[in-house]
Every structure is written in C-alpha cells, then in structure tokens.
C-alpha cells in the first residue's frame, strides 16, 4: 500500500488520452477490476434507485445501466436484508458494486462479506474508533477501497460553526477529517467525494482538496435536479474541473431515467475529448441560408443513431455554403442544399443525391455497418 502524499501546484501531471487536459496526478485505486485514478480513464458510475432487497429489480436496473455504459454501480444498504441481497446481486452483474452505508458499521462489514467491491462510508459517522478499526480491517482483508463521501448534509457541527455554515471550506475540512480517520489506520485505498448542490461551491471544494491530497476524486453535484437542469449543472461543474485536470470518476445525479445519467456523463467526457462512447451528432443551428427541412433530417438521423453503439461522429448540415470541409472532423456527414444532398466522409464528398430519402438511406447503411471500437476503461490487474 502506498504512503499518503501531498500534492502541490507543481506536482507532475498525467497527460489525458488526447493530450489536451493534463490530469492531476492521483494514486490509482482498484474497484474490483476497474482502475480509478492514476493514469486510468475517467470512470463513469451511477447509483440504483431500486430497493436493494428486491434483487430482481435491482439486477434488471444494473443490466440497463451496464448497457448504457455504467462502469461502477452503487446500491443503498440501509438494513441487514439489503446487505444480504448483495450476495445474490453481485454474481449476476458484470461491473463492480459499491455498498452505500450510513451510520451502521455492521452493515459495512456485512456488505463486504457478501461481495461488495467498495464501501461508501463516512468514518466520522460510522461509530467509535474500535468500530472503524473493524471496518478498515475487513476492507483491507478483502482489498476493498473505501469512498469517503461528504456532502452538505454530513458536515460536522463544529466545522459549520468554524466556517460559518455549508461552504467549500467546511466541506473540504470535513473530507480531510474523515480521510484522516482512515489514515490513522494506515488505510489509503480511498476515493474522495465532496458533493454540493451548487456547482460553484463544488468547483471550489474539489479544486481546494485536489491541492491537499492525492486520493482519486469522485466528482458529482448532489441534488442536481431533473434531466435538463441537472445535466447543465453537472456539466458546468464537472466540465470545469475535468478541464483543469481534476476528477477521476464521475456521477451525474438526475431525477430521471438512469440511462440519462450515463448519457450525460459520456456527453461531458466526450465534449472534453476524454472518452468516446457511442455516436456523436453535430448539426448546424440553421440560418437564413437554409434550403432544406433540417430539423426533420436531424431527428431521423438521431433515430438511426439510437441503434449505433460505436464512437462515430456524424454531421448534418443545412446547406453547402461552407462546404463539407466544415465538418472535416466528422466521420460521416450529410450536407443538404437546393436539389442536392452530399454524403461526405471525413470532409470528402463520396456521393451526391438529388433525393433526400436516398441520401438518408445511404447514410443509414454506412452507420449501421460501421465498425468502431467502443472504448472501455483499461482492465488493469492488481499488482
Ligand atoms: S450550415 Fe448553412 S444553413 Fe447551417 S448555419 Fe451554416 S450557413 Fe446556415
């Protein structure tokens, strides 16, 4: 196990896969077979909203999440029955499972014994020193990491008094205090999250903590809201942090279908060039030069792309004024003009059509036959 270390502004960074955003150097922590931190890609995760005791419903939801690209999943463990259910859920899923525990140290030990790949606890609220020592010993025996997850609701009263309430300073000190409790047991397989419902506060808190320790950071904005506003808040906070090289795993918390969370996560990562998964559609906003019904064409291409699971970039443009070169970085494109539809590949015209439906059918054919590798997190073995 590595010794803890402090990072400073001059700490070396790890280049992002495309070399655009150098990443803050964090230690690598294994969650089951998935690496988080170090030079691993930013990992996408989510949490079930099923009753964990309902094994069939929970497994079904995790399968949907896996299909949508979830790479680590968390379930709530509020009681013994939920802890016992992990033994039935874990063998039926492919991705690592995290047990979310509040207050009861015995549930943490039970979840670990039943096959959880990681524990999410706050050491400060799990009991006295002896109980924490038992949880740590259990996690160590099984090589399980612990996520210390502090949020606005978990900040200790003395820190609220010291810093004048919920704010980035109290959040950071609470996180470090909880980390310290584990460090006292020489336990450092830690992932850290400091969630605020305010994107600005989340940015400030994660920036600050990334300067104070090298544990991998789990980014999130809590209680982000319904799909549209929640995605926007998360994209602002996580996009800002990731562009500064901060963040090793992300979860977008939305009040909505779980697949939307993964779509938002990959959307954020894709926008920054950090990960690619599934297709990306770019289209022009249209303007007074428009010569076709662009909106319906975009909707049709979007429907086709629902069946494409490869990282292909497709452009749909409303005229040929600026030429196919404008969408040079798109793998495929359609440029619609008066009486002509150009099918393009990497900015080069490959075919001209006079009929809109023929052009669209040609694009559909190539998209459904395209073979691209879907990027997955690096499978890194324990060493
Ligand atoms: S591609 Fe053509 S229609 Fe679309 S915004 Fe540009 S100029 Fe306007």
Image: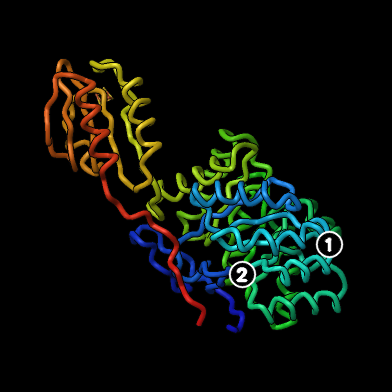
Of the pair 340 and 248, the residue shown nearer to us: 340
Between tags 1 and 2, which lies in front?
Answer: 1
Tell me, yes or no, if residue 239 can be seen here.
no
Q: Position of residue 262 (x, y in %)?
A: 52, 46
Q: Sequence-wise, which precedes: disc 1 or disc 2? A: 1
In this rendering, would 368 be left or right of 309? Answer: left
In this rendering, would 101 be left or right of 267? Answer: right
Q: Which quadrant does the N terminus fall into?
A: bottom right
Q: Secondary structure at mark 1?
A: loop
Give the label on residue 312, or none: none
In this rendering, would 125 be left or right of 210? Answer: right
Give the label on residue 103, or none: 1
Neighbour tally class for label 1: few under 14, some 14-19, many 20 plus, Cα within 10 Å? some
Find disc 2 in the rendering and name its residue: 212
Q: Position of residue 234 (x, y in %)?
A: 56, 44
Tell me, yes or no, if residue 325 can be seen here.
yes
State the separation of the CA atoms marked 1 and 2: 26 Å
Q: Residue at x 78, y 69 (%)?
A: 110
Q: Residue at x 69, y 81 (%)?
A: 141
Q: Residue 298 occupies which quadrant of the picture?
A: top left
Of the pair 195 and 209, the residue shown nearer to us: 195
């Amino acid at each position: 196990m590595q010794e803890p270390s402090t990072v400073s502004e001059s700490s070396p960074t790890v280049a992002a896969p495309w070399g655009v955003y150098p990443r803050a150097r964090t230690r690598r922590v294994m969650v089951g077979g998935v690496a988080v931190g170090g030079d691993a890609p930013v990992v996408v995760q989510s949490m079930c909203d099923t009753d964990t005791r309902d094994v069939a419903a929970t497994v079904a939801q995790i399968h949907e999440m896996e299909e949508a690209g979830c790479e680590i999943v968390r379930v709530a463990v509020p009681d013994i029955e939920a802890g016992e259910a992990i033994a039935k859920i874990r063998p039926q899923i492919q991705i690592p499972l995290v047990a979310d525990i509040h207050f009861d140290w015995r549930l943490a030990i039970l979840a670990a014994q039943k096959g959880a790949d990681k524990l999410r606890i706050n050491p400060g609220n799990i009991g006295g020193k002896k109980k924490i020592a038992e949880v740590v010993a259990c996690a160590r025996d099984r090589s399980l990491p612990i996520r210390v997850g502090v949020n606005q609701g978990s900040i200790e009263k003395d820190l609220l008094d010291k810093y004048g309430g919920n704010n980035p300073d109290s959040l950071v000190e609470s996180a470090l205090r909880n980390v310290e409790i584990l460090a006292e047991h020489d336990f450092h397989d830690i992932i850290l999250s400091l969630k605020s419902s305010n994107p600005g506060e989340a940015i400030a808190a994660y920036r600050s903590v990334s300067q104070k320790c090298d544990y991998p950071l789990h980014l999130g904005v809590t209680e982000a809201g319904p799909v549209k506003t929640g995605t926007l808040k998360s994209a602002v906070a996580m996009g800002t942090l990731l562009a500064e090289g901060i963040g090793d795993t992300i979860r977008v918390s939305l009040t909505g279908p779980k697949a939307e969370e993964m779509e938002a996560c990959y959307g954020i990562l894709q926008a920054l060039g950090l990960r690619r998964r599934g297709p990306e559609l770019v289209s022009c906003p249209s303007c007074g030069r428009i010569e076709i019904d662009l909106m319906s064409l975009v909707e049709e291409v979007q429907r086709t792309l629902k069946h494409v699971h490869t990282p292909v970039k497709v452009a749909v443009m409303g005229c040929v004024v600026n030429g196919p070169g404008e969408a040079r970085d798109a793998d495929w494109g359609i440029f619609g003009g008066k009486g002509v539809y150009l099918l393009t590949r990497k900015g080069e015209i490959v075919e001209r059509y006079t009929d809109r439906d023929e052009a669209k059918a040609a694009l559909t054919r190539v998209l459904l036959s395209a073979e691209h590798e879907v990027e997955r997190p690096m499978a890194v073995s324990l060493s």
